[in-house]
Amino acid sequence: MKSFRKELFFNTTKRMEFINITRDVEKALNESGIQEGLCLVNAMHITASVFINDDEHGLIADYEKWLEELAPHEPLSRYRHNLTGEDNGDAHHKRQIMGREVVVAVTEGRLDFGTWEQIFYGEFDGRRRKRVLVKIIGE
Ligand code: ZN
């Protein structure tokens, strides 16, 4: 069995942002040379997510509104976590609901997606450098 590991880096300009990283993951898969196996992609931070959905800008805007309604950034006093001196209590909640990672099957050297599926990095406490792990195992 072969194993391949790669880190992707992101530094968003906004606090909350969604980035389609499908091409980056496909590039990693090509570099791995793996034809059959599994591809894990996960955020390496507890205020960011990796998830799969449609790349449709209305949906992305809906996510931003929905997440801000569920866990508004302000008032900062809403979150006990912010008593630690941080201001990202909301970002932990947003990451929790959007998830940590995805696993995609690798078939004949390609990501074996369902219809319209794309991989996204979801940032909830941006404007600093953060990492995503791509780990691929197989033959
Ligand atoms: Zn925090």
Image: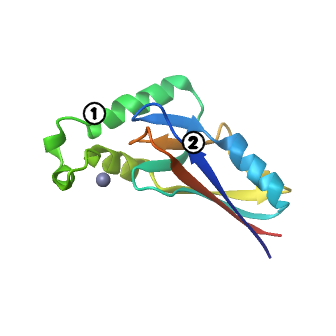
Residues at discs 1 and 2 in contact (Cβ within 8 Å) = no
Q: Is residue 16 visible?
A: yes
What kind of residue is marked 1? Glu
* Mark 1 burial class by Cα count in 10 Å: few <14, some 14-19, many 20+: few
Q: Which residue is mark 2?
A: 120
Between residue 7 and residue 33, name the one nearer to us.
Answer: 7
Q: Residue 4: image x %, image y %?
A: 74, 65
Is 110 displayed left or right of 72 in the figure? right
The answer for how far apart the CA atoms under marks 1 and 2 are is 21 Å
Q: Residue at x 31, y 34 (%)?
A: 68
- Determine whether 126 is above or below 48 in the image: above
Q: Residue 93: image x %, image y %?
A: 31, 49
Q: Is residue 113 visible?
A: no
What kind of residue is marked 2? Phe
| Mark 1: secondary structure | helix
Q: Residue 124: image x %, image y %?
A: 40, 41
Q: Residue at x 33, y 51 (%)?
A: 92
Between residue 8 and residue 48, name the one nearer to us.
Answer: 8
* Mark 2 burial class by Cα count in 10 Å: few <14, some 14-19, many 20+: many
| Mark 2: secondary structure | strand
Q: Residue 72: image x %, image y %?
A: 25, 36
Is 5 displayed left or right of 13 in the figure? right
* Furthest residue in direction bottom, as rendered: 1
Q: Residue at x 86, y 56 (%)?
A: 108
Q: Which residue is mark 1?
A: 69
- Determine whether 47 is above or below 116 in the image: below
